């Protein structure tokens, strides 16, 4: 006999948008890394805001919890269901015309970043947040995680791009303001709430200029200390600094081994740390960039992108790191924030800390250097073995850092929140949740274990 909830949801969205077949559900039940696997009661794919509200009400009546899911590229298991209904936003992908007078656009929560970037580019504009998962990550997911990415050093995280949202709360009510005048308190509430306080259905974004001129350089350093010391110099010398990304030798070797890629420093000076620097504006920038780099100490070697294909080759190395690591094994992904002046001592202590747990583990470090945001990836320990996560996150806290930087907390790090947050902060989190979602309908286990 058919599941009564599936039957109720079918009357709202149409039977073809209620997925109960385990084989089809499977892609919604496993995260991008393959490390986190769950199981969904069913997957429902509403096609409008009104359908989202009705789905939420039907689930509430049936006592079924809901996991909102966009592109499922999140890296902290926040969209992985454990018996919940998965509410996929992918059909909410409509994009409205860019409003030229304000440089704003209203888009569906299920539109991918790449889709919105292409749309904005036709008006000479773009979204200030960019990340390697752009082809799949959705605007709703990026708001929910307050995504950062490669340009956060200049434009901030997703919440800075947000003028307003439309969201459905756990009781099915519709809130938010898309009028474009800002001051939408709901936008501030849902940004970074990881699907626990409301389901974003549409968003109004502030776009930025698509600069006509861009200059890019990859720097090689013999040690992280020199790369960290370069940050304030480059920030001071380059007012149009747009990206400042770092990766270690292990990452470069893996990324350069991918088909079509190569190590631009092959056969030249041995280096351990690489920093990709990019500036963008409406004037030629190469001389300014090269001049600034001349003021940086400890640069062993450098490759300047001569043209767009060259630039794409350098960025392909950075963008390809996550995929390259995934081919080495199922990674434990630990996205953390460190004060810049503690970053070097953290990284020095990192490999011994990982080796103490698993001597055979391989550790890769890359990230958004300008913001002290590191992605520590460890390959080797079993997916369900959390000892290495524990060791790394405790090391982060010992160094005055944050256990969740741009990817959020999700389920993966929820159990460490009592170490990283004060009792008052945890009480505030719980009070907010109780006020907005007293029955714990939305994303149970995310942000709170
Ligand atoms: C190769 C790669 C590179 C990445 N690089 C970056 C990076 O540079 N910076 C960065 O910040 N992240 C990065 N990420 C992580 C990921 O892309 C972001 O977290 C992104 O914001 C997730 O979007 P999504 O649509 O895939 O969300 P999902 O994975 O589907 O969901 C993520 C969280 O948001 C919630 N959610 C999703 N949609 C909604 C909605 N409409 N309303 C309410 N809650 C919702 C989910 O419940 C879950 O908690 C990367 C991921 C990959 C695979």
Image (cartoon, rainbow, N blue to C red):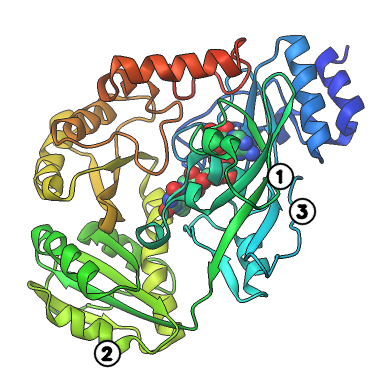
Q: Of the residues tagged 1 and 3, which is closer to the observer?
A: 3
Disc 3: which residue:
94
Label 2 CA crowd tier, 10 Å (few <14, some 14–19, many 20+): few
Q: Position of residue 428 (x, y in %)?
A: 41, 18
Lower sequence index among marks 3 and 2: 3
The quarter of the picture where residue 113 lies is bottom right
Q: Are marks 3 and 2 in contact (CB under 8 Å)?
A: no
* Residue drawn at x 31%, y 87% as measured from the top left: 286
- Image height check: is 49 above or below 370? above
For the residue labelled by badge 3, is the local secondary structure a helix, a strand or a loop?
A: loop
Label 3 CA crowd tier, 10 Å (few <14, some 14–19, many 20+): some
- In front here: 118 or 167? 167
- In front here: 136 or 23? 136
Disc 2: which residue:
287
The Cα–Cα distance between marks 1 and 3, rounded to whole angstroms, is 10 Å
Disc 1: which residue:
90
């Amino acid at each position: 006999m058919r599941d009564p909830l599936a039957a109720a949801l079918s009357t709202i969205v149409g039977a073809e948008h209620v997925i109960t077949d385990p084989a089809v559900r499977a892609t919604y039940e496993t995260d991008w890394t393959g490390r986190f696997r769950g199981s969904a009661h069913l997957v429902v794919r509403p096609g409008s805001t009104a359908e989202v509200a009705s789905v939420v009400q039907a689930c509430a009546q049936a006592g079924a919890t809901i996991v909102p899911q966009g592109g499922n590229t999140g890296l902290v298991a926040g969209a992985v269901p454990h018996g919940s209904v998965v509410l996929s936003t992918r059909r909410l992908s409509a994009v409205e015309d860019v409003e030229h007078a304000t440089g704003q656009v209203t888009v569906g929560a299920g539109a991918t970043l790449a889709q919105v970037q292409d749309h904005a580019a036709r008006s000479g504009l773009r979204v200030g947040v960019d990340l390697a998962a752009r082809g799949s990550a959705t605007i709703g997911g990026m708001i929910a995680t307050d995504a950062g990415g490669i340009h956060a050093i200049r434009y901030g995280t997703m919440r800075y791009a947000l003028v307003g949202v439309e969201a459905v709360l756990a009781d099915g009510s519709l809130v938010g303001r898309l009028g474009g005048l800002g001051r939408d308190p709901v936008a501030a509430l849902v940004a970074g709430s990881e699907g626990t306080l409301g389901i974003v259905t549409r968003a109004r974004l502030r776009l930025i200029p698509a600069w006509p001129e861009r200059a890019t350089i990859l720097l090689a350093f013999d040690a992280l200390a020199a790369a960290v010391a370069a940050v304030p110099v480059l920030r001071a010398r380059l007012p149009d600094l747009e990206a400042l990304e770092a990766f270690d030798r292990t990452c470069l070797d893996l990324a350069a081994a991918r088909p079509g890629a190569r190590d631009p420093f092959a056969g030249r000076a041995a280096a351990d740390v690489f920093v990709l620097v990019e500036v963008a504006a409406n004037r030629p920038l190469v001389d300014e960039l090269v001049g600034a780099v001349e003021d940086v100490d400890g640069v062993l070697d450098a490759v300047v992108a001569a043209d767009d294909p060259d630039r794409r080759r350098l960025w392909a190395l950075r963008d390809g790191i996550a995929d390259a690591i995934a081919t080495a094994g199922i990674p434990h992904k630990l996205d953390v924030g460190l004060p810049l002046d503690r970053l070097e001592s953290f990284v020095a202590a990192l490999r011994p800390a990982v080796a103490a747990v698993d001597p055979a583990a391989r550790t890769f470090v890359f990230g958004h250097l300008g913001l002290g945001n590191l992605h520590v990836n460890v390959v080797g320990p079993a997916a369900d073995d959390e000892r290495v996560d524990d060791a790394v996150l405790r090391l982060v806290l010992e160094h005055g850092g944050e256990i969740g930087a741009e990817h959020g907390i999700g389920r993966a790090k929820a159990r460490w929140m009592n170490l990283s947050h004060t009792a008052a902060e945890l009480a505030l989190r719980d009070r907010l949740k109780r006020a907005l979602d007293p029955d714990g309908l939305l994303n149970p286990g995310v942000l709170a274990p």
